[in-house]
Image (cartoon, rainbow, N blue to C red):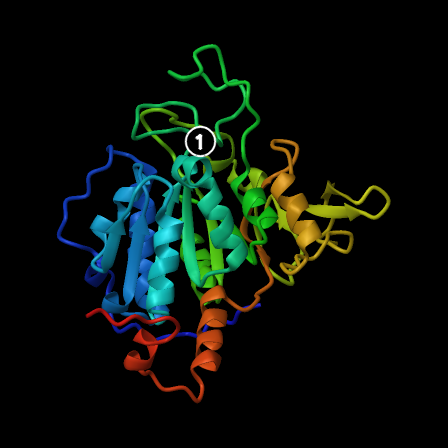
Amino acid sequence: MNEITKIVPATKPDDWASDQEVRWCPGCGDYAILKAVQRTMPELGVEPHNTVFMSGIGCSSRFPYYMETYGFHTIHGRAPTIATGVKLANPKLDVWLITGDGDGLSIGGNHMLHLIRRNLDCQVLLFNNEIYGLTKGQYSPTSRTGTRSPTSPTGSLESPVKPCAFALGAGGRFVARTIDTAQKHMPDVLKRAHANKGTSFVEIYQNCVVYNDGAFDQFTEKKQAPQTQIWLEHGKPMLFANGTKGLKLNRETLRLEVVDVVDGDASQVIVHDETNKSVANMLIDMPFPEFPVALGVIYCDPAPSFDEAVTVQETKLKAGKTADLNALLRRGQSWEVH
């Protein structure tokens, strides 16, 4: 697990906000995510001039314009590739990658897979609204079966991609999930993601008020949230519904079950071990509404980052060697022209 050191902020949230007019649809969940990120950055002990936000194409990809940092609005699905180049060129930079369910898991799925398996030291924030918003409401890789849209007028027949399952299957070492309106919990998830040295994958459920409004209301509505959400915390029992329910691991079927917690006795409730990949898979796959939606850090089992390994390799190769451009140019076959 990663320890989060308490850092005295050298900046304020306003220092991270650019002078650009924020242009998303009124009520879009992206506003809440932007504010949460800007509020969190001062607490990370990082500086704007050493920070890079980059994105692909989509509504979420306007994000870099609104951060007072270095930024790169790249092409559709290719932000992971650019992020890899940036981090390898300057490992000291703090790299954040902003993407959406379409940008990151459709045209960019291959690039995202290799970013995660390499474990490049960066934070990936995937905004999941289960629709293509920028291009006017077509169904996306995460749209639910039966979704009606301009490209699926009679209902989508496809099974949706589960972003966290994708990240875990690609070899991800840090997988988390939060909600755009979870302003109390999201900063904690972002801090944990930043503390992890490797690819930190964070799925954020984000409401699209125009083309998929209310897609997550079943588990995000404030009144019913205690019953429909379970916030995971390493080393603590998996409790929800104000501590009256919990998750139990059936040792015979090796499946999770919802159990009642009577008189505060949580002895049968499984304790969250974020290094347990098998349980992480179960938490991601829990069907709703039979089970609550798992939120927070689902899996964290750090490993050496790709950029760190490249730096070590380059250092070894350079050891005891001096650059000689003249010798390089004359190495191998040469000709004299008269």
Q: Quadrant of residue 325?
A: bottom left
Q: For the view shown, which residue lies furthest in the right direction?
A: 252
Q: Is residue 134 left or right of residue 131?
A: left
- Residue sitting at 45 percent across and 53 percent down? 185
Q: Position of residue 269 (x, y in %)?
A: 73, 52
- Front residue of 24 and 271: 24
- Front residue of 194 and 90: 90
Q: Note whether residue 261 is visible.
A: no
Q: Is residue 130 left or right of residue 298?
A: left
Q: For the view shown, which residue lies furthest in the front direction?
A: 338
Answer few, some or many: residues within 10 Å of disc 1's Cα (few below 14, many 20 plus, some between 14 and 19): many
Q: Disc 1 designates what residue?
A: 130
- Residue sitting at 49 percent across and 65 percent down? 306
Q: Position of residue 257 (x, y in %)?
A: 74, 41
Q: Position of residue 115 (x, y in %)?
A: 47, 53
Q: Quadrant of the C terminus?
A: bottom left
Q: Quadrant of the N terminus?
A: bottom right
Q: Is residue 21 left or right of residue 131?
A: left
Q: Quadrant of residue 43?
A: bottom left
- Residue sitting at 44 percent across and 89 percent down? 320
- Front residue of 182 and 68: 68
- Front residue of 22 and 157: 157
Amino acid type, residue under disc 1 in the picture: Glu
* Figure label count: 1
Q: Which element type, helix, strand or loop, lies under badge 1?
A: loop
Q: Is 67 placed above or below 149 here?
A: below
Q: Is residue 118 left or right of residue 59?
A: right
